[in-house]
Image: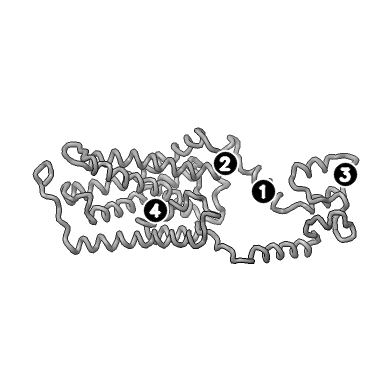
């Protein structure tokens, strides 16, 4: 019996079973996500924050999160033993077919077995090539052309990509968005970031209020909403920070402020849906009688997170479209 003399709601067996099915299905999706990341050694190629984001979201969004992961976030399969060496040999053969001999210490001085001039030492970066191409009498047009051909295509691409990374304000924005990925997928992955922060915030906040017995007007749902939001905001900003900082290579207060600007609106959009459903089921359906320690309560929370995911989509679409929020990896 609570402070107002009401008996707590006693779940029926059918309701417990139904709650268990949905919660168990979410847990299974999360475990499948984790198992695939471990099997593919995702920590070698995935942004580490996404290793946390995908499984958390799979626990309540289930198949949708698994689809986003499999289609847009799944790491490549780790090569089998010996595959790296074979790929290296294939790369060398491809270079030979195009007239570029593999670089080694044995052929640096062997002019008869290379297609390049004696001055061609496979310029390591564009800075050296730029210097050589303006060296005046020491460099002929022919040697400059050979040096350019001898450069790694990856070096050219990396340097060009570096110059394209920063906009007029020094920010790293839209270049992170995969042009082959549709906008709707980019938005849903962006929502997943704030969704993961909300889930962790709710877990911490709910149990904190339960443990302390805090109430407002003799009900615990009202302090839960306040504490849940505070923790969700904390986790959400952290998640967003460790998403945009590694992509842009910028760590510190400036990036933290950018993360906060993006995540406050995004997370608030998520919590509008979640909190609205919490009030609906706890106040409207069960009249404050559904206890937090029941299976049904956490099934309702799972449903609320789905609703929150939906209400966060328009805000994230606007934030990403305006360049306020980074397109997440």
Badge nearest the viewer, 2 or 1:
2
Disc 3 crowd rating (10 Å Cα; few below 14, some 14-19, many 20+) is some
Few, some or many residues within 10 Å of mark 1 (<14, 14–19, 20+): few
For label 2, the residue is 249
The residue tagged 3 is: 139
Question: Which residue lies most toward the top here?
Answer: 253
Q: Is residue 176 left or right of residue 213?
A: right
- Label 4 sits on residue: 56
Residue shown at 49% from the left, 50% from the top: 48
Foreground mark, 4 or 1, reads: 4
Q: Earlier in the sequence, mark 2 or mark 3?
A: 3
Q: Nearer the viewer, mark 2 or mark 3?
A: 2
Q: Give the mark, 4 or 3, whose residue is nearer the N terminus.
A: 4
Distance CA(mark 1)–CA(mark 3): 25 Å
Residue 158, image x, y percentages? 67, 48
Q: Nearer the viewer, mark 4 or mark 3?
A: 4
Q: Secondary structure at mark 1?
A: helix
Residue 158 circle label? 1
Mark seen at residue 38: none
Q: Quadrant of residue 20?
A: bottom left
Q: CA distance from mark 4 to mark 3?
A: 59 Å
Mark with earlier residue (1, 3)? 3
Above or below: residue 30 compared with residue 142: below
Q: What residue appears at the point 46 percent right and 39 percent down from the top-left corner?
A: 259
Do callouts 4 and 1 mark residues in contact (Cβ within 8 Å)? Answer: no
Circle nearer the N terminus (2, 4): 4
Q: Residues within 10 Å of mark 2 (few under 14, many from 20)?
A: few
């Amino acid at each position: 019996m609570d402070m107002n003399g009401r008996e707590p709601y006693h779940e029926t067996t059918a309701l417990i079973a139904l709650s268990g099915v949905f919660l168990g299905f979410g847990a299974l999706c999360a475990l499948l996500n984790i198992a695939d990341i471990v099997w593919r050694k995702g920590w070698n190629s995935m942004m580490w924050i996404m290793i946390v984001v995908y499984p958390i979201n799979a626990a309540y969004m289930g198949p949708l999160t698994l689809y986003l992961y499999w289609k847009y976030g799944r790491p490549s399969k780790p090569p089998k033993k010996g595959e790296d060496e074979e790929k290296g040999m294939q790369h060398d053969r491809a270079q030979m077919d195009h007239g570029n001999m593999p670089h080694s210490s044995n052929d640096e001085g062997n002019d008869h077995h290379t297609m390049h001039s004696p001055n061609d030492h496979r310029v390591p970066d564009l800075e050296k090539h730029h210097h050589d191409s303006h060296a005046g009498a020491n460099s002929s047009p022919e040697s400059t052309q050979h040096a350019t051909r001898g450069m790694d295509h990856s070096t050219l691409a990396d340097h060009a990509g570096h110059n394209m990374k920063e906009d007029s304000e020094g920010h790293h924005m839209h270049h992170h968005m995969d042009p082959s990925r549709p906008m709707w997928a980019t938005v849903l992955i962006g929502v997943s970031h704030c969704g993961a922060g909300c889930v962790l915030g709710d877990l911490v906040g709910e149990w904190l209020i339960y443990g302390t017995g805090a109430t407002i007007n003799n009900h615990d749902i009202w302090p839960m909403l306040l504490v849940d939001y505070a923790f969700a905001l904390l986790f959400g900003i952290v998640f967003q920070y460790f998403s945009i900082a590694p992509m842009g290579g910028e760590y510190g207060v400036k990036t933290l402020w950018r993360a906060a600007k993006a995540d406050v609106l995004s997370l608030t959009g998520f919590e509008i849906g979640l909190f609205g459903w919490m009030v609906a089921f706890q106040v409207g359906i069960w009249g404050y009688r559904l206890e937090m320690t029941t299976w049904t309560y956490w099934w309702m929370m799972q449903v609320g997170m789905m609703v929150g995911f939906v209400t966060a989509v328009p805000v994230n679409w606007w934030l990403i479209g305006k360049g306020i929020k980074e397109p997440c990896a």
